[in-house]
Image (cartoon, coloured by chain):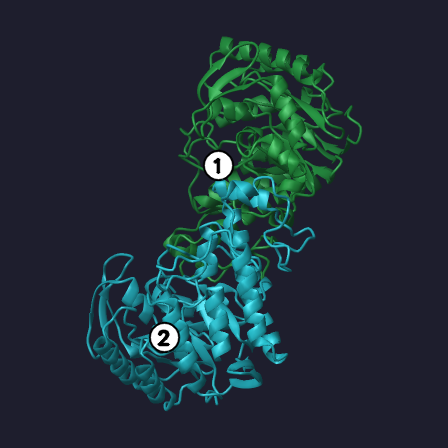
Chain colours: A green, B cyan
Amino acid sequence: MMKTPGFSFAVEATDGDARAGTLVTPHAVVETPTFMPVGTQGSVKGLTADEVAATGAGIVLGNTYHLWLRPGAEVVRALGGLHRFTRWRRAMLTDSGGFQVFSLAGLRAIDDDGVTFRSHLDGSARRMTPEESVKTQGLLGADIAMAFDECPPGDADRDVIRRAMDRTSAWAARCLAVERPEGQALFGIVQGGIHEDLRHEHLQAIAAMPFDGVALGGLSVGEATADMHRTLAAVTPSMPADRPRYLMGVGAPRDLLAGALAGVDMFDCVLPTRNARNGQALTWGGRVNIKQARHKLDAGPLDPRCDGPCCDGGGGTYTRGYLRHLYVAGEMVALRVLSIHNVHFLVTLMRRMREAIKAGRAREFARDALEAMREGDEVGPADPASKGRPVGAPGAAPPRR
Amino acid sequence: MMKTPGFSFAVEATDGDARAGTLVTPHAVVETPTFMPVGTQGSVKGLTADEVAATGAGIVLGNTYHLWLRPGAEVVRALGGLHRFTRWRRAMLTDSGGFQVFSLAGLRAIDDDGVTFRSHLDGSARRMTPEESVKTQGLLGADIAMAFDECPPGDADRDVIRRAMDRTSAWAARCLAVERPEGQALFGIVQGGIHEDLRHEHLQAIAAMPFDGVALGGLSVGEATADMHRTLAAVTPSMPADRPRYLMGVGAPRDLLAGALAGVDMFDCVLPTRNARNGQALTWGGRVNIKQARHKLDAGPLDPRCDGPCCDGGGGTYTRGYLRHLYVAGEMVALRVLSIHNVHFLVTLMRRMREAIKAGRAREFARDALEAMREGDEVGPADPASKGRPVGAPGAAPPRR
């Protein structure tokens, strides 16, 4: 169970390994499985907090690394914490900054105490430790903080992964020892790559600690999709049943469905907003590439099956023809509408999955949804050679959280 | 009076030369004086139609030149016209494309029949004539179309201006001869630079034609502000009293106030959105430069005297500290909030001017507003050497419509 006062998690229904639950935080009651859009630098890219709320999202992720560098956690604290700063009223989770330190920062040197690196903004020398991460997250003041972990790349050797596991375990204990503000939970992170034995071993270590929830890190970092799905199916059911389970940095529809079927409760990814900036809309009929000339005279919405704020058939409807024009003309509004649409789509995908779990037809729902998306997919099926690339971004680099 | 069925204009109150009126169009009843934000390429830069409506704007300007080149007027027509295309439900006016042909396009050659030029998008050869402009505006289908005029630069010789006047008069007659769709009015344009005698002469010619409204073109094109204000005061009161008077391409607060005092009813400018992209907010206490470090920890709104959707003191309030962070971090949301704020400010400035006219205190209102803006101005008073530069953009080029 969740230990921090003000938090609770209950599983309402299961269907195979999949679960429909309710996560209570000081700011919101979040129904799971749930997709969390990412507010990288204090905003979900291009969107106001009100727009994010209108997508139905119940919880947003904030990036500690970015906010720590700019404007600084003390500034956010002085302006009332991340909730007041960003005007987001529902639940919020901050990552530890570890993923960005390992993926964005330059010249990093890891030792057992922490990581020294250069800021990607100005090249200045910085040091992040488990203590600094939890302290920083305390200043930001999200509902849920994450332990500082070492996240090795997807092609790392087994012994590199094992060393990262050991370090992550030691850092987990140090994170738990740091005092947090009232009303802030802390989740631990399991590493182990795509090695089932390592995953189980590390899961045991992390699950034994008094974390409020347990996350799977180190997936969607370059490994093949099939390996990720196999690992999820093998490991997730062994995660503590009475605490929330969070799969970090994953947002492609097929990965959300595979994760939810395996029993994951929470997901986050920049995929919906990043794909929007590339002109891609996620729809129930597959991906729409708004740049294509075929949309030029199309008076229909992005997705006739969508009940979201951009496709609703009322005054809110944006036609494909209009959106194509705005995108081609470089007008910001196109990115916004596609971003709202894509976030709404993933939030709704998980909401419908939740309904399917409660109805005992989770597998059926996932199968039918994937089949319909494959059929109409404008971008074509994902390149089988594009290991770990999300469905929504063939040929693109794995999304950064 | 306005000749086109579906349109009417009535002056409700006057105060000196200033007037408070009501312009009825097929899509809206617009209270004047009014400021029209500019929807350059089918959107007011960065804003959805709903956001523009939330600023209180009753009428928006669309750029015929941009839409003619991309996506093409036939495409807009096929998607239901500019109103349906852009989701804007209130009144709309399109310019003739002339201003952009003269300011944006390359290698132009003017003859008595029209203008040949190269598209700024792809360098392709294009030709615009009075007939093509009105026909294009008919396809776009705004409430109000503008006659195609020749707009010489602010430093043009007197004989260049006179030739432009003559051509504009001939083109005006040709524009009136083109059939327009039902429910579309047509305004004529007066040229003449800052020469009062030429302005009066051309005004007589244009006012004698059966236009639904009369506009002043060729101001805010590089001339000194004092010359513009002098010209406005001398010419505007002679414009037909029973038709709307429109001052084109002007949006700095002091110019709006000077124009309204002289009897102008309608204004348009890209200033509010362009200044937003430069980090400038227009406030009742002067311009705020959101980039400045002094805003870093400021938990106050952009303007405590503003009742707009970004400063309202409720859940909508964006703090200066948050906006500065977003702007410095390059996050789009900063540009949006500043754009909404600035459009709302100019729309409200004219709404309050209207109230002042009705209360018989127009001059007082303008004087007090300008004084308060000067006092708190963060950017400093406009450079006296910056001829024709709008208050909101010292050192910048004159805004393009």
| Drawn side of residue A136 relative to residue B16, left or right | right
Q: Quadrant of residue A64?
A: top right
The subunit carrying tag 1 is A
Q: Secondary structure at mark 1?
A: loop
Q: Which amino acid lies under the numbered mark 1 shown in the image of this protein?
A: Val
Looking at the image, residue B198 lies above or below residue A342:
below
| Label annotation for residue A391 | 1
User: Percent position (x, y) of residue A171?
Assistant: 62, 14
User: Percent position (x, y) of residue B273?
Assistant: 47, 57
The mark closer to the camera, 2 or 1, is 2
Marks 2 and 1 on same chain: no
Looking at the image, residue A31 lies above or below residue B207:
above
Categorize mark 1 by other alpha carbons within 10 Å: few (<14), some (14-19), many (20+): many
Q: Quadrant of residue B223?
A: bottom left
| Residue A320 seen in the current view | no
Looking at the image, residue B168 lies above or below residue B322:
below
| Drawn side of residue B246 relative to residue A259, left or right | left
What residue appears at the point 40 percent right and 68 percent down from the top-left corner?
Answer: B249
| Label annotation for residue B217 | 2
Who is closer to the viewer here, B268 or B263?
B263
| Label annotation for residue B159 | none
What residue appears at the point 58 percent right and 71 percent down from the top-left corner?
Answer: B365
Who is closer to the viewer here, A201 or A323?
A323
Placement of the C terminus of chain B among the 4 image quadrants? bottom left
Categorize mark 2 by other alpha carbons within 10 Å: few (<14), some (14-19), many (20+): many
Who is closer to the viewer here, B371 or B242?
B371
Q: Quadrant of residue A12?
A: top right
Q: Which amino acid lies under the numbered mark 2 shown in the image of this protein?
A: Gly
